[in-house]
Image: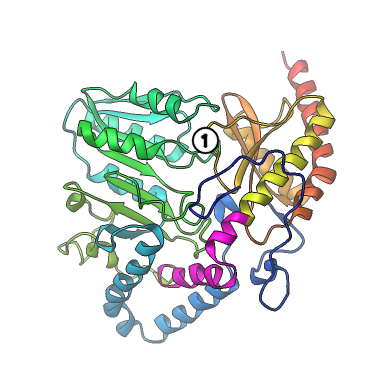
């Protein structure tokens, strides 16, 4: 389970379901969201879910914007700057280092667009990296006339093995390291703190993909040495869509500019990101409402603890259902586990690539009424579960009882089709 500081203790053998979280008036936590009750929402980690309180606050802000746009837009940079202060405190960052961007990938793209080659033009990534981010690194390497080096990190690698695998690819020609704080496809941590300290010693810029970190890890930047970090607030922190932070530290910070030039271009970093023409920025201004709602209702430490305990219970229940179906252990040995997220191995024939994993996600939503995440790593398919405060043990018991048998049938059909294909 997760501790108050956001660390994780393995609880694969948890057998007791945690008691569901309730609102102050005794209603289920899910009543604070507008999620369709006809679906089971078991994939918070992909797109998040926005509490009604934050939705209502954003609607109020939009009404204000549309009521007096000539007043709104000149005043907007000041309001965004004030919002950045609160968000920086939540992340454990200096407000002067934090710029607002639409998502983590946009923050990474800002770095790619502004960073200059200094050595051999090599960029080091890992085989756990988010596809769009890795594609951006490859594009930058082509522009530099360099290449991308991929560190192979076994799924079960502990901190030491993961660190050694990454640093083995860093050499005299390395101009940039791109490392996930929490991996998307494999739901594990990478030792970014240790990598960051060594990268700083060697003078190699480090860009951390922290897409999943805000809300899941307490103050994810507090003990992290890096040049750049980008994280989504619209995932675990439940802010409105399009809310993310780019944090830049050190001498390279002042060379970062927004992807779109606007009248704030002459302002210092990060102020130049606060003026982006007529972009609807109400999602940024409503983000503190989402953070405050969870903080005031349950407290973030208690919310994280519940998410992790529920994820551990779900892993056991669903893993046992798959094991009973296939006769094979569905548990996954993840070297540096993450609070609130787990992997369960799928039967052979399901989700063996990103394309087939996404197709399975869409089919499960359409035919099973379940929003779930399926991922692939090394040709193996996984169910990636990510629990939030509105989920309950009954959600995962339903998945084990109703969905696992159907997934087993789909797997058998897929294997039969593969055998028939010449």
Pick whichever, 168 or 252, lies toward us: 168
Question: Coloured how?
Answer: rainbow
> Main SS type for the magenta part?
helix
Residue 96 is left or right of residue 283, and the answer is left
Classify residue 124 by image quadrant: top left
Residue 368 is left or right of residue 374, and the answer is right
Look at 29% across and 37% down and name the residue there: 197
Classify residue 143 by image quadrant: top left
Badge 1 marks a residue whose secondary structure is loop
Q: Is residue 402 above or below residue 118?
A: below
Q: Is residue 298 magenta?
A: yes
Residue 237 is left or right of residue 13, and the answer is left
Residue 373, percent from left and from top: 64, 44
Residue 301, percent from left and from top: 54, 60
- Local packing at callout 1 (Cα closer than 10 Å; few below 14, some 14-19, many 20+) is some
The image shows a total of numbered marks equal to 1
Look at 69% across and 71% down and name the residue there: 31
Could you tell me which quadrant the C terminus lies in? top right
Pick whichever, 262 or 251, lies toward us: 251
Look at 46% across and 58% down and name the residue there: 233
Classify residue 51 by image quadrant: bottom right
Q: Is residue 43 above or below residue 151?
A: below
Pick whichever, 153 or 3, lies toward us: 3
Look at 48% across and 42% down and name the residue there: 182
Residue 240 is left or right of residue 407, and the answer is left
Residue 306, percent from left and from top: 64, 56
Q: Is residue 197 above or below residue 213?
A: above
Q: Is residue 317 magenta?
A: no
State the residue position of label 1. 336
Residue 228, percent from left and from top: 30, 46
Magenta segment range? 284-305
């Amino acid at each position: 389970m997760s501790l108050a500081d956001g660390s994780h203790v393995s609880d694969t053998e948890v057998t007791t379901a945690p008691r569901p979280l309730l609102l102050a008036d005794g209603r289920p936590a899910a009543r604070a969201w507008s999620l369709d009750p006809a679906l089971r929402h078991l994939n918070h980690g992909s797109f998040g879910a926005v509490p009604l309180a934050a939705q209502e606050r954003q609607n109020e802000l939009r009404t204000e914007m549309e009521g007096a746009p000539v007043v709104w837009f000149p005043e907007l940079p000041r309001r965004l700057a004030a919002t950045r202060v609160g968000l920086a405190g939540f992340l454990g960052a200096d407000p002067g280092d934090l710029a607002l961007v639409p998502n983590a990938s946009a923050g990474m793209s800002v770095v790619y667009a502004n960073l200059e080659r200094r050595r051999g033009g090599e960029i080091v990534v890992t085989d756990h990296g988010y596809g769009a981010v890795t594609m951006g690194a490859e594009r930058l390497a082509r522009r530099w006339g360099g290449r991308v080096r991929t560190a192979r990190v076994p799924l079960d690698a502990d901190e030491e093995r993961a660190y050694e695998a990454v640093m083995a690819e860093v050499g005299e020609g390395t101009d940039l390291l791109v490392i996930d704080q929490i991996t998307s496809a494999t739901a594990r941590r990478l030792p970014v703190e240790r990598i960051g300290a060594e990268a700083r010693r060697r003078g190699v810029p480090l860009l951390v993909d922290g897409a999943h970190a805000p809300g899941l890890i307490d103050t994810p930047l507090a003990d992290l040495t890096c040049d750049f970090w980008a994280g989504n607030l619209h995932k675990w922190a439940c802010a409105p869509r399009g809310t993310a932070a780019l944090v830049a530290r050190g001498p390279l910070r002042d060379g970062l500019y927004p992807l779109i030039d606007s009248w704030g271009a002459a302002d210092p970093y990060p102020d130049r990101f606060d003026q982006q023409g007529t972009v609807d920025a109400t999602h940024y201004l409503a983000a503190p409402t989402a953070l405050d709602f969870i903080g005031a209702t349950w407290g973030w430490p208690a919310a994280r603890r519940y998410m992790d305990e529920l994820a551990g219970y779900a892993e056991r229940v669903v893993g046992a259902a798959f094991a009973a179906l296939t006769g094979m252990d569905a548990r996954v040995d993840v070297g540096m586990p993450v609070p609130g997220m787990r992997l369960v191995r799928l039967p052979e024939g399901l989700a063996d690539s990103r394309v087939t994993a996404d197709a399975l996600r869409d089919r499960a939503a359409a035919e099973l009424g379940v929003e779930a995440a399926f991922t692939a790593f090394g040709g193996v398919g996984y169910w990636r579960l990510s629990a939030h405060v509105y989920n309950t043990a009954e959600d995962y018991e339903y998945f084990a009882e109703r969905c696992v048998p159907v997934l087993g049938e789909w797997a058998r059909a897929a294997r039969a089709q593969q055998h028939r294909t010449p």
